[in-house]
Image (cartoon, helix red, strand yellow):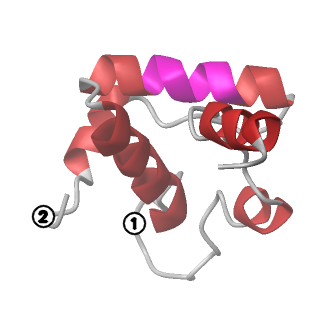
Amino acid sequence: MTNWPEYNEALRQRGDITIWFTEEALAAWRPAKTGASGRPQEYSDLAIETALFIRQVFHLPLRQTEGFMNSLSRIMKATISIPDYSRISKRDHPAW
């Protein structure tokens, strides 16, 4: 190895856990209106899947997942509401 400073920096960056939501994800946070009867879903599948992904990656219980997502939303100054733990649980995907 001849470039130790660059190598050291690359190793440091492996620990960076920067998380962000794209503009497209924020726009798709709420589901499109379907016109079907009954109560519409408050969160899109994308919102629930995002919460479940974060839950799986960080090995969080449902309530902590909700708190983590609220923290991300606050840090990003995103104007989205976060699904509560019971909604995440009710729509938990079998693949997760």
Nearest the viewer among 26 and 42 is 26
Q: Does the magenta portion include 60?
A: no
Residue 38: assigned label: 1
Q: Main secondary structure of the magenta part?
A: helix
Question: Residue farthest to the left?
Answer: 94
Q: Is residue 60 left or right of residue 13?
A: left
| Relative vertical location of residue 14 with respect to residue 47 in this rendering, above or below | above
Question: Residue farthest to the front?
Answer: 2
| Relative vertical location of residue 32 with respect to residue 89 in this rendering, above or below | below
In the picture, which quadrant includes the C terminus?
bottom left
Q: Is residue 41 left or right of residue 32?
A: left
Q: Does the magenta portion include 70?
A: yes
| Relative vertical location of residue 87 with respect to residue 96 in this rendering, above or below | above
Label 1 residue SS: loop
Residue 39 position within the rendered picture, expressed as x and y whole percent measured from the top left: 43, 58
Rendered image quadrant of residue 56: top left
Residue 61 position within the rendered picture, expressed as x and y whole percent measured from the top left: 24, 23
The residues bearing labels 2 and 1 have C-alpha atoms spaced at a distance of: 24 Å
Residue pictured at 22% horizontal, 46% vertical:
90
Q: Amino acid at mark 1?
A: Gly
Nearest the viewer among 60 and 7 is 7
Q: Amino acid at mark 2?
A: Pro
Residue pictured at 43% horizontal, 53% vertical:
48
Q: Are marks 2 and 1 in contact (CB under 8 Å)?
A: no
Residue named by callout 2: 94
Residue pictured at 79% horizontal, 22% vertical:
75
Q: Is residue 63 left or right of residue 33?
A: left
Q: Which residues are magenta?
A: 66-72
Label 2 residue SS: loop
